[in-house]
Image: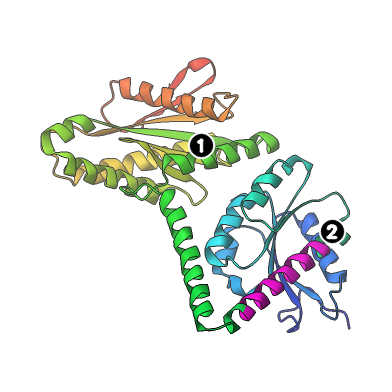
Amino acid sequence: MIQDPNAANARPNAIRVLLIESDDASADRLEQSLFEYRYRSAAMHCERVESLESIHALDMKSFDVVLTASVLPDACGLEVLVFMQGTSPDTPVIMTGGEADAALAVDAIRGGAAEFILLTGHESTTVPLAVEKAFVHRQLRDENENLQEDLGRSMADLAVLNRKLEKTIRQLEVTARTDELTGLSNRRWLNLMLEGRWAEAQRHQLSMAFLMLDLDGFKQLNDQLGHQRGDELLRVVGEVIDANCREIDIAARYGGDEFCILMPHTDLDAAMHVARRISDAFTSRVAGMDLASVQIGLSIGVGHRDLSGPRTAEDLVRHADEAMYAAKASTELERRVFVRARGGAMLSAAA
């Protein structure tokens, strides 16, 4: 009897595959290849979603293998890999992509992917075999763990301790990419994400914005009110940025009183909307703080791939930085937002 790949409940002995693919044509080919394949006496049951956000509501432990595209509407395959390592580290992840995405293969394997498959038209053979291989490898690993537990209580205790150590390491990895004071990403993690997202934007000609934000009057506040009040203000900035960014944005503390936001898949109007929203929210929050006579402001510079014409990711950051300094030099006292255009021209966009 042929297994229906879209059945609500797969057979108990079916290999349960989660397919993360936004392209309908690619998804159809992959689902068909899994549907037609037989592993021993079992079929492969496939459930499809289209984005990283979609899998947040799923019980990832109910899947045996994850098959993800290298490029998604709200993420890249490497982010799916990081998510799976944090939620269900025992579930193997296979990444797929076209020839333009081949450069990601090394990063994917180094990051822990079971395999990276180039979609060259032979998916009916390569993809099911890769799924079977990952499934069998997981089964063998699980069986080996059970045998290890049978060796005795001491070995079982050691296995538990190893699991706890792995969890601790993952938690430390999260901590290592987070700024302790503000809770935003740190500069190291930002640079890693910037490199990957820039390469994606270049390959697929996608829009991308970068916002640089800097506090005005921060040194005066530290000198007059003390560093504790300065830290309090930095935490407020972090909260304002985090509350007004979109889910796909990557907000980070760049250093000192400078912050930045990487905005992939973003046109200029959307970037400006976020900048103005942050500026308004910051002005409102600062008005409720007792900062005595210290005048605090927020200067925001915007660099955009389509407008300022950066050749590299570093150029995009530099353009946003130049626009931020132009905003800081402006005579306006509040809500200063500047955009860098081609040739170095600065466009004022103060609310």
Q: Local crowd at mark 2 within 10 Å, few (<14), some, or many (≥20)?
A: some
Q: Where the N terminus falls, by quadrant?
A: bottom right
Q: Is residue 277 above or below residue 17?
A: above
Expressed as whole percent of the image width and height from the top left, the position of residue 132 reads 79, 68
Q: Local crowd at mark 1 within 10 Å, few (<14), some, or many (≥20)?
A: few
For label 2, the SS is helix
Q: Is residue 19 above or below residue 196?
A: below
Residue behind mark 1: 269
**Residue located 17% across and 30% down the image:** 220
- Separation of marks 1 and 2 at Cα, in angstroms: 43 Å
Expressed as whole percent of the image width and height from the top left, the position of residue 22 reads 70, 55
Give left or right: position of 155 versus 99: left
Expressed as whole percent of the image width and height from the top left, the position of residue 113 reads 66, 56
Q: Between residue 8 and residue 111, name the one nearer to us.
A: 111
Q: Between residue 115 and residue 121, name the one nearer to us.
A: 115
In reply to whether residue 142 is colored magenta, the answer given is yes
Residue 24 occupies which quadrant of the picture?
A: bottom right
Expressed as whole percent of the image width and height from the top left, the position of residue 165 reads 47, 65
For label 1, the SS is helix
Residue behind mark 2: 126
Which residue type does callout 1 highlight?
A: Asp
Per the rendered image, the range of residues in magenta is: 129-147
